């Protein structure tokens, strides 16, 4: 129950368009952004501390959590019988990367209780027109990979051409190369294009590596056109330049050998644990070496397993299910045992990180509490390291999602949030 202690505030909130379908979270009305944030008393409930749910009581003052009672309380929220999590984060998706998809999917993030997202193949020029409409109270916070580096015949060109053809549009590679992504074939290319890549001061770059050990054979296969990648020989210099301007580097990979190469090059994030068996390889080629895992731990290299995205590959190759899932389970077991930092990300355009936490739990490598901590704590902190989010602590951002049941007993409860508060503003009740 939410009780309003100040009548005028109650009237304002009651008249704002907060209503949503049962179990959904509506967007915050525009007028709320111009008003002082209410002082909230968040009473009762069981709050997730990263390991378990414990009874607690917090206040939200100026959008920050505190245990110190304020002089005046504007709104009392009774959380008795509800389970409270920090908001979820999705470290790998692509559905907010242009104006149309952002308009279509941004509110859906909030409805699912996902307040933070990394969009891993954006374009600085394209997102410039709408990025100011995202982030802050009532809106999903986004970390964009503002430049994607690949080869002139590499991923994501194949997807772009296929999409254009399906839409009845011209499918000319020149419309995408050095526009949607940067084609880097040599250090000369990097020298010539780096000033344009760096001028927007990106926080994150993405590099595309696709079975680099067999790059020569790929280029003899016409069917691989548009799905190849950049040479890992160029990666150390890319990483050096990116770090020099304060940007992190995430790497798309296609094999265990690729992961070994990108980790040795110094990338910050491995954007996938291999979730398909590429042409010409076997499941054995996806098994990480102990030396690679040790190097990831030494460097602090983060990995986003994206287990849920296997559904696309396995729909077309059901015969590979047992082998693929076995090697994924083996890799995850050893990564976890070594203490390699992992993030939760789905890479599901039509799904979310909730699908990913369910897929991770299904591997039997993690407990439900561990996957909850992964998506509510480790991931948001990694995406936005300069913010105090991902936990309930003194001075942390007052952002939370409340549920009627215990998600640690049943992860499907994550699909039915009942209350959301972002930076001290009530999104739904």
Image: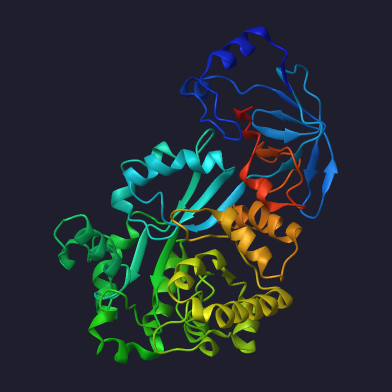
Left or right: 313, with 112 as reference point: left
Question: Which residue is farthest top?
Answer: 7
Q: Quick check: 113 above or below 97?
A: above
Name the image quarter holding residue 163. Answer: bottom left
Query: In the rendered image, which quarter contains the N terminus?
Result: top right
Q: Quick check: 97 above or below 246?
A: above
User: Which is more toward the observer, 217 or 266?
Assistant: 217
Q: Position of residue 52 (x, y in %)?
A: 82, 52
Q: Residue at x 58, y 72 (%)?
A: 301
Q: Is residue 11 visible?
A: yes
Q: Position of residue 294 (x, y in %)?
A: 65, 83
Q: Residue at x 63, y 33 (%)?
A: 421
Q: Residue at x 55, y 64 (%)?
A: 308
Query: In the rendered image, which quarter contains the C terminus?
Result: top right
Name the image quarter holding residue 368. Answer: bottom right
Q: Position of residue 417 (x, y in %)?
A: 64, 39
Q: Is residue 389 visible?
A: no
How many labels, in total? 0
Q: Residue at x 57, y 85 (%)?
A: 287
Q: Position of residue 338 (x, y in %)?
A: 71, 78
Name the image quarter holding residue 61. Answer: top right
User: Which is more toward the observer, 327 or 43?
Assistant: 327
Instruction: Tell me the colour scheme of the image.
Output: rainbow
Left or right: 77, with 387 as reference point: right
Q: Quick check: 314 above or below 248?
A: below
Question: Which residue is farthest front?
Answer: 319
């Amino acid at each position: 129950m939410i009780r309003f202690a100040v009548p005028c505030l109650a009237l304002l909130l009651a008249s704002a368009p907060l209503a949503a379908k049962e179990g959904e979270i509506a967007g915050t009305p525009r007028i709320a952004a111009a008003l002082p944030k209410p002082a909230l008393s968040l009473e009762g409930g069981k709050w997730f501390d990263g390991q378990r749910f414990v009874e607690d009581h917090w206040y939200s003052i100026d959008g920050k959590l505190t245990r110190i009672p304020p002089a005046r309380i504007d709104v009392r929220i009774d959380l008795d019988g509800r389970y409270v999590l920090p908001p979820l984060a999705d470290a790998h998706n692509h559905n907010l990367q242009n104006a149309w998809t952002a308009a279509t999917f941004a509110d859906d993030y909030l409805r699912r209780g996902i307040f933070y997202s990394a969009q891993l193949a954006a374009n600085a020029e394209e997102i410039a027109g709408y990025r100011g409409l995202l982030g802050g109270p009532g809106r999903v916070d986004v970390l964009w990979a503002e430049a994607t580096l690949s080869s002139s015949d590499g991923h994501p060109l194949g997807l772009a051409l296929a999409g254009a053809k399906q839409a009845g549009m011209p499918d000319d590679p020149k419309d995408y190369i050095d526009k949607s992504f940067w084609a880097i074939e040599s250090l000369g290319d990097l020298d010539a294009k780096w000033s344009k890549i760096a001028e927007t001061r990106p926080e994150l770059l993405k590099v595309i590596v696709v079975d680099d050990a067999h790059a020569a054979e790929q280029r003899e296969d016409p069917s691989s056109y548009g799905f190849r990648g950049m040479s890992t020989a160029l990666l150390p210099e890319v990483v050096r330049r990116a770090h020099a301007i304060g940007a992190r580097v995430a790497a798309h990979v296609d094999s265990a050998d690729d992961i070994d190469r990108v980790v040795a090059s110094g990338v910050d994030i491995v954007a996938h644990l291999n979730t398909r068996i590429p042409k010409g390889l076997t499941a054995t080629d996806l098994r990480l070496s102990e030396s690679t895992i040790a190097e990831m731990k030494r460097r602090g290299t983060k990995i986003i397993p994206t287990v849920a995205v296997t559904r696309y590959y396995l729909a077309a190759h059901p015969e590979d299910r047992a082998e693929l899932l076995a090697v994924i389970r083996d890799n995850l077991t050893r990564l976890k045992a070594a203490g390699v930092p992992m993030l939760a990300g789905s890479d599901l355009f039509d799904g979310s990180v909730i699908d990913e936490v369910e897929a991770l739990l299904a591997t039997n490598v993690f407990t439900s509490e561990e996957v909850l901590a992964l998506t509510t704590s480790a991931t948001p902190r990694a995406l936005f390291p300069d913010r105090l989010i991902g936990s309930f602590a003194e001075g942390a951002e007052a952002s939370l999602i409340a549920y009627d049941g215990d998600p640690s007993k049943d992860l499907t409860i994550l699909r039915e949030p009942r209350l959301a508060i972002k930076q001290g503003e009530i999104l739904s009740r």
